[in-house]
Image (cartoon, rainbow, N blue to C red):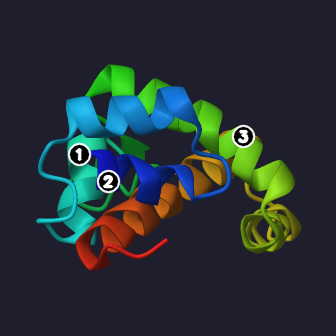
Amino acid sequence: MAQDVGVLRSILGIGTVASTMLITEMPELGTITDEQAAALVGFATVAHDRGTLRGKRTIAGGRRALRHVMFQAALVAAHHKPTMRTFAACLRKAGKPQKVIITAVARKLVTLANALCKSRQK
């Protein structure tokens, strides 16, 4: 667990609280696929389509407390981490709402944390 905490803390935007929450709320981190990790946190999009009606996609389910912590980590990462800042700027330029941008950045952080825990790299 100490090695996982070190790996998670190396990601800019994930601090003490976020790394602790990731370890405690998602013990399967590093052993699952990126899609499964996003779904466990609750960042997988859910379609509300019916017949010819095509609705907006929403996020639902997952581990709520962890999702709230990852939103906060995404706010920090979108402001301070250069790769996430350019990703957020591209989404902003495409006309996406701020909540969609932060959700996308948070999902990217979760998949990054999963991949780094899987490979044990900082």
- Seen as rendered, the residue at the extreme front is 2
Amino acid carrying label 2: it is Asp
Q: Which of 31/6 is in front?
A: 6
Along the polypeptide, which appears first: circle 3 or circle 2? Answer: 2
Q: Are marks 2 and 1 in contact (CB under 8 Å)?
A: yes
Amino acid at dot 1:
Met
Give the quarter of the figure containing the N terminus.
top left
Alpha carbons under labels 2 and 1: distance apart? 5 Å
Residue 114's spot in the image, x, y percent?
Answer: 32, 64
User: What distance separates the C-alpha of mark 3 from that of mark 2?
Assistant: 22 Å
Pick whichever of labels 1 and 3 is earlier in the sequence: 1
Question: Which mark is on residue 4?
Answer: 2
Q: Is residue 25 above or below residue 50?
A: above
Q: Nearer the viewer, mark 3 or mark 2?
A: 2
Look at the image and tell me whether residue 97 can be seen.
no
Q: Secondary structure at mark 2?
A: helix
Q: Mark 1 highlights which residue? A: 1
Q: Which mark is residue 75?
A: 3
Residue 99: which quarter of the image? top right
Label 1 residue SS: loop
Where does residue 32 sit, x and y in percent of width and height?
Answer: 13, 65
Residue at 27 percent of width and 38 percent of height: 23
